[in-house]
Image: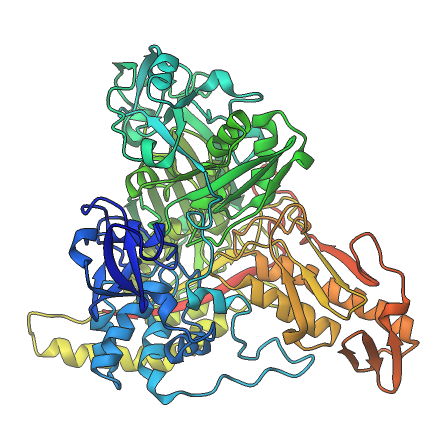
Amino acid sequence: MKDNAPGIGFALDGRPVAADLPPQTRLSEALRALGAEGVKVGCDAGDCGACTVLVDGAPVCSCLVPLGRVGGAQVETVAGLAVDGVPGALQASFLRHGAAQCGICTPGMLMAATALLRANPTPSEAEAEEALSGVLCRCTGYAKIIRAVVDCAQGAAPAPAPAAGAAVGARVERLDGVPKVLGQDAFGADGWPEGTLLVRLIRSPHPHARFTLGDAQGWALARGLTVLTAADIPGRNLFGTIPAFVDQPVFAVDLVRFRGEAVAALVGPRDVLGAMDLADFPVAWQVLAPVTGLDAAMCAGAPLVHADRPGNVLVRGRVHKGDAVAALATAAAVVEGTFDTAIVEHAYIEPEAGYALRVGDRLEVRACTQAPQMDREELARIMALPEAAIRILPCATGGGFGAKLDLSLQPYIALAAWVTGRPCGMVYSRADSMAATTKRHPGRMHARIGAKADGLLVGMEFDALFDTGAYASWGPTVANRVPVHASGPYHIPAYRADAAAIHTHGPIAGAFRGFGVPQSSFAQESLFDDLADTLAIDRLEFRILNALTVGLPTSTGQTFSQGVGIRACLEALRPHWARARAEAAAWNANAGPVRRGVGVAGLWYGCGNTSLANPSTIRAGITPEGRLVLHQGAVDIGQGSNTVIAQIFADALGMPVGQVTLVGADTDRTPDAGKTSASRQTFVTGAAAYRAGRALRAAALRRLNAGEDAVLALDGPILRAGDTMLDLRALAADALGYVLAAEESFDPPTTPLDANGQGAPYATYGWGAHLAEI
């Protein structure tokens, strides 16, 4: 397809084009085939709005519009908003307000907002909300997006660049923000090499079944396809996230344990395989009764999901401190309750996508991920290759929230590329993503909590079961993290918490923003309300009274000498709590059909791995030409690590953040910064970046023979400290091309938990408090 070619003609961002495709082709597909990859696809159902474009000025979900409908029309995409590559006013407003995070929904948001602003240049927030209601975002909470649209007409200038050493705490436009607002950020479905073959999976339609494959090779050959099964795996036909619990087959061999499990892969030309009905693929199923839900998994005589895991128990976790039973017997008031939480889908806007290349005896995989180093390690085992023969280049990731920590399509595209010698790519449908990727653990929790008459807590008992589904994934992390956190950020002298992850034939449960902590918080904070009410103590004041402070032990017996912020967070809510409660009381006194409620809760969250090594490494250098380069492998999935880590590094070095050239995650070019999970990147990789900045500064000062308080400046190849100058071109470069370089690591200090869960599982916690008006 090219300009002025035969086919259905229309204007695309002001230039005439023609798409030689069937008229029933989705407009989104046709636009992307014409090179307009700023049109993102999230659902192909009109649900997410990421593919929003303007057709004759009206916003439409291009996945719902057939190509034949736009003949002769004016079609506008995000690419038309910029002028000579410079962001337009609306795009600049998005940058200024930090309205683009992961960036997958940003093109659709911009187009919907463009239609609004043409009709109404000064919309209210309510009008902006209505206009953008058809475009979903899973990162931002929408507030910055709405403000960017409302403020666009003001045309405010961006905040001035912070001075050297003053980037942390300053308002800095995202260093990776411009490609996001231009629609040029390359996600897993974007930028595939010419001739990339498509990979599709044959998945089980049953949660539990035995199966046999027929003449899969003959079936595939007759259709010009390649078929791959477990027999084609060169190495280990298993993957997982925690070495002691690796248990999920890449391809099932003769038994499937969840609906959506892969049994074979087909590889072929995109136009052929993409349109093919695979219903007659030769596989025969013998359906078996599934173990569904916690009750079925734990009843006497329950079938085992895994023969080597008795009672369907994957793992147990515990934290015991003091005698909780005895303590509760002394309480003036005791409350208890049982709480069930449901499975939750992550629903990131970008379904899993990516492609792989075979480059000689190496594999390069470009796909969405939160953990490139873990991907490399697992793929090396699957492919029976040295880790050095695997290169992971994370693409832009359109939201992850935990589920993109696990391997998804990576083994299939890697194997296909290795076998065929051709680039091979895959894009999960929304149905594939929901069927095959991990979910938030459903849980059942029972707790008893008691306090004295004055409101001071005395003890707590907590028991939890989590349905971890067919395979382990992050189930061990949930079972061990929850007992640590189930007390909430409060001082409870006597405490017993036990948890277990239980196998069923349900969807695999894994990481989802908190590793089980939100579930336990729901139980604990709900009972706190009951306990405060029973004792006739204000709910907020009850929490403030019991909040952890410096020197008070946590549930694991750990104490901190600084940085315990929960009481300050709760106290900051006092005036808002009083106002909201008074307004709710006045509202409800009118006895109308709509009632108003006010809720409050506290939170804490251990940053990083639980009682395990958790290091990050950062590399930085200065070239002979005076280019300041930061190699940071922390994957930015929207949370802003590309910018935050650069800010920390620049301040530690003492140079402006605007001078930093970022080399993002790439296992060939960046050291291991660990996985993007558990709220660890700003703390752990940020600390490594601080150390690298200080080390590079020390190296520069030594070369300049300058004191520690000297102000460093780079002016092309000239490095200055006051009046002292150094021509970098006169220095010998190292193997990476740097004349000055540093590489530093940080691993948070923790200790293992003992048999009762006592120890120092985290070097620090995040603290917070939340007030909600409903």
Residue at image location 55% in from the left, 69% down from the top? 175
Query: In front: 101, or 569?
Result: 101
Residue at the right extreme of this rendering: 705
Q: Please state the total of marks drawn on the protein image.
A: 0
Residue 224 visible in the picture: yes
Q: Quadrant of the C terminus?
A: bottom left
Q: Nearer the viewer, residue 591 or 667?
A: 667
| x and y percentages locating residue 637 in the rendered image | 48, 56
Up-down: is 556 above or below 99?
above
> Which of these two is toward me, 296 or 179?
179
Identify the residue shown where x is 43% and y is 16%. Answer: 307
Q: Can see residue 550?
A: no
> What colouring method underlies this structural image?
rainbow
**Taking 649 as reference, is 703 left or right?**
right
Instruction: Classify residue 600 by image quadrant.
Output: bottom left
How far from the left and from the top, in percent, is residue 266? 39, 26
Tell me: 381 left or right of 83: right
Decide if residue 411 is on the left or right side of residue 27.
right
Vertical relation: 70 (above or below) 205:
below
Residue 571 is drawn in which quadrant? Answer: bottom left
Name above or below for residue 285 compared with residue 150.
above
Residue for point 29% across, 19% down: 281
- What is the x, y in percent for residue 692? 74, 62
Could you say where residue 604 lies in the image, as x and y percent from the top left? 48, 59
Q: Who is closer to the viewer here, 200 or 241?
A: 200
